[in-house]
Image (cartoon, rainbow, N blue to C red):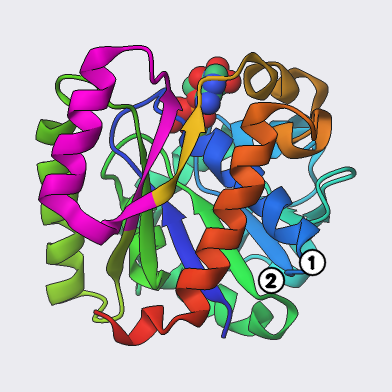
Amino acid sequence: MPHIFCIANQKGGVGKTTTTVNLAAGLAQIGQRVLIIDLDPQGNATMGSGVDKRTLAHTVYDVLLEHTAIAEARVRSPKGGYDVLGANRELSGAEIELVNLERRDRRLKTAIEAAAADYDFVLIDCPPSLSLLTLNGLTCAHGVIVPMQCEYFALEGLTDLVNTVKQVHANLNRELQLIGLLRVMFDPRITLQQQVSEQLKGHFGDKVFDTVIPRNVRLAEAPSYGVPGVVFDPASKGAQAFVAFAQEVVQRVTGGLRSAA
Ligand code: ADP
Ligand code: MG
């Protein structure tokens, strides 16, 4: 089985999609076979990978409703070096349609199992909510990666997310664990960010990834070109940080992450 990670945080605009596409591109650069599953109806991970969400023949919506398999619905990111199971607005309807269906929280898991041999990593970009879509993601994942900004209310929001992960672990998916917290859009000149960062390490210890992603304008510019920042400007500080993050993730995985529940 590939390592299946949800990139989740119930807040919007915290860097989930940026983390998903750049981690995917970083992993691809070090020889890993990667699939991104876009679980957000906004389709930002799809577009940010250079895949036009408006012209997709099949999306994750068709996979959730079991109309099609991942092998048929996936497309290649032209520059990213990984595959994408895309999303668009259609997906917002799946939420309602899924409610009345059997195995509604497990459909993604079954679909990934059928494509498991093709990938080393599956990265699921979650919407900013704890919806049935996010639950589908958490139910099939081995772990959750939480990108976060080191701001005043950051720790408060984390408590909710950590409790959700615990509940899913207890009731739906014994494999699920918090892999780590990734500090993103970090500006070391801001004292408050340093303080929150220290608090984070105090609370969560080695669950805080060593790699820190700086605030970097090249990362913000890249999506409008349909290219992950890692590929868009490899020399930029943001790109280099994400390549280092990909290496850290691989290290954690090979260092017995699965057994360290
Ligand atoms: P989410 O998926 O959580 O809603 P995004 O990844 O879309 O968040 O990021 C929100 C905005 O912040 C986007 O405009 C993105 O380009 C920008 N952004 C994300 N990470 C960085 C960073 N490290 N430096 C600068 N801008 C960033
Ligand atoms: Mg997003």
Give the residue type that dot 1 points to: Glu
Front position in the image: 17 or 89: 17
Q: Is residue 87 visible?
A: no
Front position in the image: 236 or 103: 236
Mark 2 crowdedness (10 Å alpha carbons): few <14, some 14-19, many ≥20: many
Magenta stretch in the rendered image: 180-209
Split into 4 quadrants, where in the image is the N terminus? bottom right
Mark 1 crowdedness (10 Å alpha carbons): few <14, some 14-19, many ≥20: few
Which percent across, then down, holds residue 134? 35, 51
- Does the residue at mark 2 contact the one at mark 1 (Cβ under 8 Å)? yes
Q: Which residue is mark 1?
A: 72
At horizontal 12% and vertical 75% (from top left) the residue drawn is: 170
Q: Is mark 1 within 8 Å of ligand 2?
A: no
Give the residue type that dot 2 points to: Ala
In the image, residue 188 sits, relative to residue 20, either above or below, namely above
Which percent across, then down, holds residue 63? 60, 62
Quarter where residue 81 is shown: bottom right
Q: What mark, if any, has residue 136 been given in the picture?
A: none
Say what secondary structure mark 1 lies in.
Answer: helix
Quarter where residue 46 is shown: top right
At horizontal 19% and vertical 41% (from top left) the residue drawn is: 200
Q: Is mark 2 within 8 Å of ligand 2?
A: no
